[in-house]
């Protein structure tokens, strides 16, 4: 099998690292090879952040190349646009449909592009857009938005990893006191992703 | 046991399982998690040192005392620690000593992209370079054995993509390591000329033994492909080579100092031209050429940034024809995607200081930390930034070059951790040499940039224990600064007044701007602020704070509730009282 390439993109501070740790844990307990490349340091201060995850097969490079991503898990709309060139044509783009203005927009030097979702679709991405924060809010805490997105991801049958394995991975990584909320958030995401 | 570990975590586990009992370090991306992970092991004494030089010296002491010791830092940290590094090469070790250095090609979080391999070469220190987390673990364990076997410190070189990538690691049984005996041995450890001359001879002999070791070490291995091309590589570049050229013959080097000669010659003999794939400097390539091997490398690659498999495929397509590149999504919007540079967090205490400095149009000698972001628009309030601690030396030099009038418009700005790391010596220079400069210490009670490490000014150790807290005010007074002011950078009026007074004073002064990092646990956040549309005159002053929570809307500035932490800085700034919030 060829590795499945997943990229997680967002804004520093959005909790993308937790998502990649869940993917890693799910891969390892499925006895799949896995490499995850994270960003720490400077760009975490509200900058554009990307995490590369590769699962299955025999993996050498921990990074995903342009045009090689099978899935782009996007925590923010503009970041989805920025990194979309990494996604292969026909690849899956899971989008948390949130807008966070970057400094040049705040300062009024540039504007936040409109029509991003349409452009992504026209450009060959298969888009699933959800308001993950609102769904997480329904489950009891907005901060579980990343778990909602993981639920959507899991529903897409990534690398043959079973639903229970994903759930165990989520439970193993989120803080114990937020367990129930995250279980619910995962389930909601899973349902949304599989069109239930 | 199989687990998915960061390269940095794997180094920490490797150190633990090699029986390391002392770890000293100063944080620096991408090396920080090594020591943070070690700090979780009860059986290892660990600490944050004030800087890398002290960290290496502490590790040296532990090694002389018979323990296995480790010390980790980022590439520029090794510059700070270079002094002990070169001489511990002469003394050698007692307990195994491993110095980890993490380079940052591409400058994800650094001010330059120097190549640490040259340190190994010039200091004659064995250097190993892992290419994934398993090798991080294995090479770290091996480093301690080799250190003792060859009586040498060992450098372990990582790069960002190895340090910060997770991959699967199988841990092995922990070694029971007993402290070695301590014997006074002046000829070995007292580096006065007479002894050092003799030790230099030992270093040369050791080098010969290490070269021999490098010829046959299992860390250097040939992986046979289909003979279509021969590539030499190491570290992360090796992974890119395997990804780009699955059919090539590859010589993977795990020992990068000393480099083998015979092994390289034998390998090259099968190829018309040897491809050398390495990031940054042509370190391996220069060695190959020096021993008469023709190479293809930097002439086609780059000294800058990181390699990628795509770059390798493209640049060597004449030798190894590449398959077709996949079709990528191409999404185009009417407006281009604006960049998203990092910014000071909403509620960051540094924002108040930079607002005032920008307003006063001072020449600001900056330094390295979160506050370097003060250089970003809209405040753009920094004139120069070179390395940790440099702000103080620079402000002093400016004063001496351009005189008192200029000095009255010039300040140095640096953080608490940076001041202790290497700012204090600069301050002594100012006092001693009759300078008149003003130094602003932005004391946010933590080492912020690298992800919240304790430091001597926080009064808490790496293990979270209370300890004696350095009093910055007393420290500055003790070196002879008579004007030391402590103030709150969010009290904009007062802060401005203090800055004006201190820059005007014709003597050295220090302003300690005290307010804790908003991300610290226990720092109170308040309800978000909001804008009273009736009172707002749309003057846009609040946008000049560069707060990520204040955005420009058609109806005027607006506050993003989910981001605002209610620090109230904008409310204090607004001349029309249009921003409301409970503040604190
Ligand atoms: C010699 C050296 N060591 C380590 C680093 C990594 N580093 C960058 S900024 C920083 C500390 C900043 O802390 P502080 O001065 O307290 O400022 P803050 O980020 O909290 O505002 C460190 C350790 C470096 N750039 N250079």
Image (spheres, coloured by chain):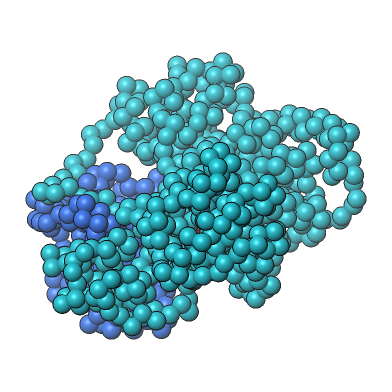
Chain colours: A blue, B cyan
Q: Quick check: A143 above or below B393?
A: below
Q: Which image quadrant for residue B266?
A: top right
**Going by the image, does B547 lie left or right of B384?**
left
User: Which residue occupies 53% across, 60% down?
Assistant: B502
Task: Examine the rendered structure and indicate whether residue B298 appears above or below residue A41.
Answer: above
Q: Residue at x 66, y 48 (%)?
A: B434
Point 54% across, 29% down: residue: B283
* Number of numbered callouts drawn: 0
Where is residue B1, by image quadrant? Answer: bottom right
Say which of B456 and A115 sits in front.
B456
Does the rendering let one see residue B417?
Answer: no
| Left or right of residue A99, residue B109 in this image | right
Name the one closer to the observer, A81 or B12.
A81
x then y, percent, for residue B295:
47, 20
Q: Is residue B17 above or below residue B90?
A: below
Task: Report if residue B164 is visible in the image.
Answer: yes
Left/right placement of residue A176 relative to residue B341 reads right
Q: Position of residue B29 (x, y in %)?
A: 50, 53
Q: Which residue is at a point 48% across and 40% down the rendered structure image? A: B113
């Amino acid at each position: 099998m060829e590795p499945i390439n997943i990229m997680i993109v967002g804004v520093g501070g959005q909790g993308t690292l937790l998502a990649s740790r869940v993917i890693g844990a799910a891969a390892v307990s499925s006895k799949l090879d896995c490499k995850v490349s994270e960003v720490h340091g400077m760009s975490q201060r509200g900058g554009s952040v990307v995490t590369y995850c590769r699962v299955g097969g025999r993996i050498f490079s921990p990074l995903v190349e342009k045009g090689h991503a099978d899935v782009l898990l996007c925590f923010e709309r503009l970041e989805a646009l920025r990194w979309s060139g990494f996604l292969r044509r026909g690849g899956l783009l899971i989008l948390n449909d949130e807008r966070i203005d970057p400094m040049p927009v705040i300062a009024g030097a540039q504007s936040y592009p409109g029509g991003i979702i349409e452009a992504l679709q026209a450009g060959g991405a298969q888009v699933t857009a959800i308001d993950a924060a609102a769904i997480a809010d329904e489950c009891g805490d907005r901060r579980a938005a990343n778990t909602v997105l993981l639920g959507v991801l899991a529903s897409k049958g990534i690398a043959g990893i079973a639903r229970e394995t994903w759930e165990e991975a989520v439970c193993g990584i989120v803080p114990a006191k937020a367990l129930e909320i995250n279980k619910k958030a995962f389930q909601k995401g899973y349902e949304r992703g599989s069109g239930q | 046991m199989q687990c998915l570990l960061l390269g940095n975590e794997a180094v920490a586990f490797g150190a633990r399982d090699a029986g390391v009992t002392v770890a000293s370090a100063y944080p620096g991306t991408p090396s920080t998690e090594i020591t943070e992970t070690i700090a979780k092991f009860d059986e290892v004494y660990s600490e944050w040192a004030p800087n890398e030089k002290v960290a290496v010296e502490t590790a040296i002491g532990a090694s002389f005392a018979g323990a296995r010791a480790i010390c980790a830092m980022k590439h520029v940290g090794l510059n700070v620690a270079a002094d002990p590094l070169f001489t511990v090469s002469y003394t050698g070790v007692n307990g195994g000593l491993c110095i980890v250095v993490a380079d940052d090609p591409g400058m994800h979080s650094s001010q330059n992209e120097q190549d640490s391999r040259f340190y190994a070469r010039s200091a004659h220190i064995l250097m190993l370079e892992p290419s994934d987390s398993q090798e991080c673990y294995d090479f770290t364990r091996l480093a301690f054995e080799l250190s003792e076997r060859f009586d040498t410190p060992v450098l372990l070189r990582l790069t960002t993509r190895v340090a910060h990538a997770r991959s699967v690691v199988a841990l092995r049984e922990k070694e029971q390591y007993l402290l070695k005996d301590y014997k006074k041995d002046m000829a070995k450890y007292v580096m006065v000329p007479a002894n050092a001359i003799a030790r230099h001879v030992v270093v040369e002999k050791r080098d010969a033994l290490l070269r021999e070791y490098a010829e046959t070490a299992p860390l250097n291995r040939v992986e046979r492909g289909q003979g279509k091309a021969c590539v030499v590589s190491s570290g992360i570049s090796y992974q890119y080579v395997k990804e780009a050229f699955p059919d090539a013959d590859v010589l993977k080097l795990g020992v990068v100092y000393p480099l083998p000669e015979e092994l390289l010659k034998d390998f090259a003999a099968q190829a018309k031209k040897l491809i050398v794939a390495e990031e940054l400097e042509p370190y391996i390539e220069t060695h190959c050429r020096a021993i008469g091997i023709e190479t293809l490398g930097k002439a086609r690659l780059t000294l800058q940034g990181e390699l990628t498999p795509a770059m390798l495929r493209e640049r060597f397509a004449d030798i190894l024809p590449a398959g077709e590149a996949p079709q990528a999504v191409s999404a185009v919007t009417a407006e281009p995607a604006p960049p998203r540079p990092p910014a000071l967090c909403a509620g960051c205490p540094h924002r108040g200081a930079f607002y005032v400095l920008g307003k006063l149009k001072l020449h600001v000698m900056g330094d390295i930390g979160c506050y370097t972001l003060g250089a970003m628009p809209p405040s753009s309030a920094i004139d120069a930034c070179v390395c940790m601690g440099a702000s103080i030396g620079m402000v002093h030099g400016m004063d001496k070059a351009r005189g008192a009038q200029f000095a009255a418009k010039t300040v140095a700005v640096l953080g608490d951790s940076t001041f202790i790391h290497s700012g204090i010596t600069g301050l002594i220079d100012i006092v001693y040499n009759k300078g008149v400069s003003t130094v602003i210490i932005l004391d946010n009670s933590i080492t912020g940039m690298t992800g919240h490490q304790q430091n001597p000014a926080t009064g808490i150790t790496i293990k979270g224990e209370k300890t004696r807290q350095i009093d910055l005010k007393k420290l500055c007074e003790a070196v002879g600064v008579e004007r030391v002011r402590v103030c709150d950078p969010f009290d904009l009026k007062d802060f401005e007044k203090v800055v004006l007074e201190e820059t005007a004073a014709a003597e050295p002064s220090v302003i300690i701007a005290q307010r804790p990092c908003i991300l610290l646990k226990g720092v109170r956040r308040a309800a978000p602020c909001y804008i009273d549309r009736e009172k707002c005159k749309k003057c846009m002053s609040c946008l000049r704070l560069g707060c990520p929570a204040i955005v420009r809307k058609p109806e005027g500035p607006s506050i993003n509730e989910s981001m605002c932490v209610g620090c109230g800085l904008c409310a204090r700034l607004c001349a029309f009282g249009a921003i409301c919030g409970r503040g604190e």
